[in-house]
Image: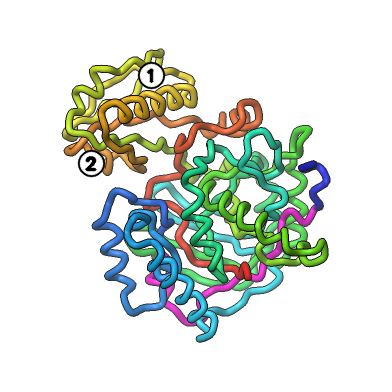
Amino acid sequence: MFYKSVPEEMIGIPQILLPAHADVYTWAVNACDQFTGDAKYWKAVEELTAGRLSTYHLVFPEIYLKDCPERRIQAINAQMYRYLSEGVFRQVDGGFVLVERTTASGTRTGIVLAIDLEAYSFRQEEEAPVRSTEATVLDRLPPRVKIREGAPLELPHIMLLYNDPHGKVLSAAQRGEVLYDSDLNMGGGHVCGTYIRNAEEVRRAFLSLRQGADGMLFAVGDGNHSLAAAKLCWEKVKKGLDAGQQAIHPARYALCEAVNIFDPALDFHPIHRFIKISDPEKFFSGWNIRGGGSAGAVVCGKVSRLPFPEDIPAGIRMLDNYIAEYIAQNGGEVDYIHGDDQLLELSQSGAGVMLPAIKKSDFFSLIETGGNLPQKTFSLGEGNEKRYYIEAKRIK
């Protein structure tokens, strides 16, 4: 695809759906790919939202991907259609949403908008204006595609990063009506959403940030596999449409939140590795990774230091190869853990590798010069600081 031909409408001004009457505290829930090793977390969310209007009933927590997925997908799709028919949503037209999220890290400010999937690629060889940041694991896409294919709505936990050291975009935004203002459940902090009245001007400010010969604008900070699934679904849908239909089809655009990488409350955290095995000492006795940096070996809640490369992406590639080889020879299963405390708790039943964080000041240069990072290299904030589902958009 010749991405330089992508029109300025690569940033869409969406028709956003918000709950008309629901309590935002129980409506909004954390991203579905968080706390994948913590059944107690999602059980608590389920109990909190039982019998109440909530995005919990519209998303698929990934901890349950192996638990009767077909039945859960059918229930999600049915609930989406029910919410649409029963007037649960109100529509917000002609503007973006300014999202201010307050957590222990401070107040992070983002803008909910839509991006043209024609301007996005998760394939490393394609230098798209909207670009993935980590290697896409193709085996992880089919369940996400299956969830999306029958859904009339999308709810985003995707976070795009943009490079705006002088704050041009947020300076351009004019505030309008406060759309929601609420604490968030499960220790998620507080969120306030405000209508942006001058979406066209803000869109121009975004587009002025395109850089490099390929015009890169956004890098996917969170939700790369969800956006990749949206892309695959769109590629399938558009085959049955003529050019005019393709231009206006709602599945062509994906709802995302864009955050300036220089936002002071945007923290980069590593995503640790947890290997479910019975003999963690054997795993660490074969450690063959060297370097001038360090990682942590976590066993039974105790941390000891391991040598690790200063080039963190290179070190993670080595680590993932070692884990894959070890599991192939000895059995076991790997999980990707957000947060030191969760890794320490899980390490009672396996081996944890506590990884260092990349510097966010290096982020865009790493993507532009080296392409995709290894899968699960970084996380934006702790698990309870991730984007909560609030806004929705039609895709059918």
Q: Earlier in the sequence, mark 2 or mark 1?
A: 1
In this rendering, position of residue 20 left or right of residue 36: right
Give residue 362's position: percent from left, percent from top: 56, 29
Residue type at mark 2 is Leu
Residue underneath mark 2: 346
* Residue at x-position 41% and y-position 56%: 32
Name the image colouring: rainbow
Q: Residue 154: which quarter of the image?
A: bottom right
At x 43% / y 66%, what residue is drawn?
Answer: 73
For image coordinates 61% across by 77% down, the residue present is 91
Report which residue position mark 1 lands on: 308
Which quadrant would residue 90 be assigned to in this image?
Answer: bottom right
The residues colored magenta run: 8-29
Magenta residue check for 13 = yes
Q: Describe the element under mark 1 as helix, strand or loop.
A: strand
Q: Residues within 10 Å of mark 2 (few under 14, many from 20)?
A: many
User: Residue 71: x percent and y percent?
Assistant: 38, 68
Name the side, left or right, on which 10 lies relative to 51. Answer: right
Dot 2: element: helix
Return the x and y of residue 330 as percentages of the image width and height.
25, 28
**Magenta stretch: includes residue 125:** no
